[in-house]
Each structure stands twice: as structure tokens, then as C-alpha cells.
Amino acid sequence: MALGVAVVLQRWLTALPNAFGFGLKLDLRLDLRVFLICVGLATLSTILFGLAPAWRASRTDIIGALRTTLGSGGGVGQLRLQKMLVAVEVTISTILLLLGGLFAKGLQTAYAADPGFQSDALLIVSFDLPPEEYGASGGQALIEDMRAQMNQLPGAESASLAANLPLSAAHHAVQLLDSAGNELPARCNVVGPDFFRTIGVPLRAGREFGVRDSKASAPVVIVNETLAARLWPRQVPLGQTLKVERGPAKGEFQVVGIATNTRYETVWDDSEPYLYFSAAQVPVPVGNLMIRSRVPPATLIAATRSAWRVFESKAAIVEILTGRDLVNMAFAPQRVATGMLSAFATLAICLAGVGLYGVVSYSVRQRTREIGIRLAMGATPRMIVTQVLRESLTLASAGVIAGGVAGFMAARIAVSYFRWVSLSEGLTYVAVAAFLALAILAASLAPALKAARIDPMTALRLD
């Protein structure tokens, strides 16, 4: 049966759209080795968890069992073991729910953070330009033709090129020299004309790179606010000479612009010294063309591919992304971690709910005579329901408390590794507690109502 369900799910999942919002290709074909491993694990689990009940059944006192009346409270040891297992399930569920909630809240906060550039209405074409083609005499003319061609697309507002994309780990490192001759490490990018206008990063002062910034002109550079404040704290940065000792380029560059600080690798990075070189002056291949559009960027994909046919023989398209895709890819590890934790938490709370329902139902069945006596002596159905719910909440509360403490300790460890997770999310703790309370009540309500409907006369006649 499980194999049939797996086949159906495999076909269903492959037809679903990607839920993570970024390129993710998974091979979901059924594998014989995986199937055999699952069969082996299932068999081993059945044997291990069946040994204790089988051993207990083999030691049953037959005479004592025959004398035991139905509903007299037998099986106390078995019920105690079941309660312990349910408490463990609730503990694990609480830990996973708490971590999943904190991860989800941290991811929501990350998406709300300002990445420093405008991802909306942005289309990115990543292409492969061979180094020998880029180094040829017509290399610069080719990439300028690309920019000009994409700039003419219907709905395009501006276009530019860059070696590195924001929110990515691929940023070149450079070594600078300050006025005292001390080394200052920084990161850099190599960009084309209209880059800041296209990417949506405003300039605080100065100008963008233009077509006039070529190999024949004086070397120029644009620095961010952090680097400008570090090198010229009491001076006007524009017109200053920046000395580059090591990196994609060396020598002296004149500062022609001051760019706003943005996020370069992740949205949690502190503002670091950063500078931009002109693609026409620094021999670094640029493999990303960005288009700022006046229409939804996804509607430009077909037109972009059609217009790119002119360049296919020299520069093949690797990937086309929207600005939203770029942000989703930057948050890929966080999205996967949050999704996996949420999935495991959902499974755990379902198992805990089923276990709690079974334990409460078994307890009610064992106490049928007791409940019948209470009802015969004047207890109301509402009192019985309240008592059963109180006992189930007491049982689950031990797991919730233990899981809350363990979950908080696990979250403290997670914070040291994942900067986007915060412990100061009071609403998350309240939401997890409320969800667990509702799940516990939902699992206990049916057995409690069943206990309230017990007929006292029938219960008293049970032997």
C-alpha cells in the first residue's frame, strides 16, 4: 500500500510548482535501494517496538486476567508507559514548533529588511562570455552592444552590466592604502554605465560611470559611504585619489561618486568598505546584465531571449532571473531550514495528537465503572468533560514545559550560528503555546465527550 501511495505522490509532487521560489531540481524517481532500506527500517522498528508488548503478554497471569473485571482499572502499568511516550511526543513537538516559529519569524524579518537595492521591476540575464572573447579587441564593444540592445526592449527603463550580483558571495577582494600607507581590505564590483540607476542604489554625491570612462580616459572609481568615511573622514571624498595595491586592478583611481551603503553578501552583513570599478577600464569579465523595467519583469523574459539571439554565438544565456528570484535565492538556506522544521513540526504534532487521543480514550475505557459511579452520584456530563480535559492537559503540560525549556536552549544555540534567528520574539512563544493548547484540546475533546455520554446503569452492570 505504501508503495502505491509513493507512486501517486511522486507524480503529484513533480507536477507541483516550486514552493521555495528559486531554482530547485529534485530527482523524485523511486529507487530500489531506497525502497529496500525503508523496508529494512520498517521491519526493524516493528520488531524493536513489538518486543516489549510481546514480552509483557507472555508474562500475563491467566487466572488474574480472567478475574479482572472490565473497566476496573487494569493495565495501569501499560497506561503509565503510554503516558510517558505521549509526553515525549509532546516534548519533541514543542521543540520543533518553537524552532520552526522562530525560524519563520526570522525569515519574515529578513524579507522585511532593506537589501539596499530595488529588487522589484528588475530582470537579470546571466550569460557566459568566454575570457578569450572578452579579452579580444571587440570585447568591450560587444558588452556595450548587449546593454544598448536590451535598453531598447519595450518596457525597459535602463540596462547595465556587472561582474557580481548583490546578495551573493562572489565579490572580488581588493587591498587599499590609506593616506598613512596602511593597508585596508575591501570588496569591489566591476560594473557598466547606468549600473546604480538600474540596480536602484542611489548616489550620495558625484556621478555614475558613463561611456566616456574608457581605457583611454583617466581611471575612475566609485566608493560607498563606509569606505569614504574610513579614508576621508574630514574631507570631501569626490576628487580624491584612491590607491589600490592588490585586486582586479592596481594603481591610482580618482573618486567620481559616493554610493549609498547596500547589502553585498547577505542582508545581515554590516556595512563594509566597498568600491566599484568601471567595466571599460578593468579587465574583469562581466557576466550579468540587469534590466530595470516599467512593466512586470517576468513579461520581458520572452522578448529578452528573442533579442539575445544576436549574441548567442558569442555569449550564451545561463539563466534569467527576476529581482524577486534573486532575493529568494539569497534566502534559500533559510527558506529550506524553515520549511523542513515546519514539516517535521507538523508531523510531530500530528503524531502527538494521535497518541494523546489514544491514551485518553484508553484511560476513559479503563475508568468506565468509575465514571458511571460518579454520574450515578450526581456528577454532570460537563463535570466529566472538564475532568477528562484537565487530566489530558496535565499530562501534556509536562511535555510542553520540558519541550519549551529544551526548545529555548536549542534556539540559543541556533542564534549563535544563524544570525537571522532572534530569541526576543514573544509573540512566537505565545503562538506556539496557543497552538499546542488547541491541538491538545482537539485531541482530548472526543474521548471527553464520549465519557460524558456513558450510561451509569450500563457501566455499573459491567463485569
Image: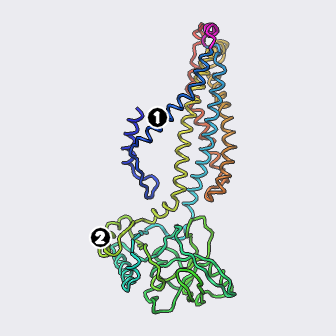
Quadrant housing residue 448: top right
Q: Nearer the viewer, residue 441 or 244?
A: 244
Compared with residue 5, is residue 306 higher up or lower down, i.e. above or below?
below
Amino acid at pointer 2: Ser
Query: Can residue 158 be seen from the camera position used here?
Result: no
Q: In this view of the protein, which residue sits in the foreground, 333 or 422?
A: 333
Residue drawn at x 67%, y 35% is 397
* Residue 184 image point, x, y percent: 65, 79
Side (left or right) of 111 relative to 28: right
Where residue 245 appears, as percent x and y from the top left, is 60, 84
SS class, disc 2: helix
Q: How many marks?
A: 2
Magenta span of residues:
60-70
Q: Which residue is mark 1?
A: 39
Alpha carbons under labels 1 and 2: distance apart? 51 Å
Q: Colour scheme of this structure image?
A: rainbow
Closer mark to the observer between disc 1 and disc 2: 1
Does residue 63 belong to the magenta stretch?
yes
Residue 327 visible? yes
Left or right of 184 on screen, residue 348: left
Q: Quadrant of residue 225?
A: bottom right
**At 60% from the left edge and 87% from the top edge, which residue is drawn?**
243
Q: Earlier in the sequence, mark 1 or mark 2?
A: 1
- Residue 306 is marked as 2
Residue 451, quarter of the rendered image: top right
Quick check: 242 above or below 272?
below
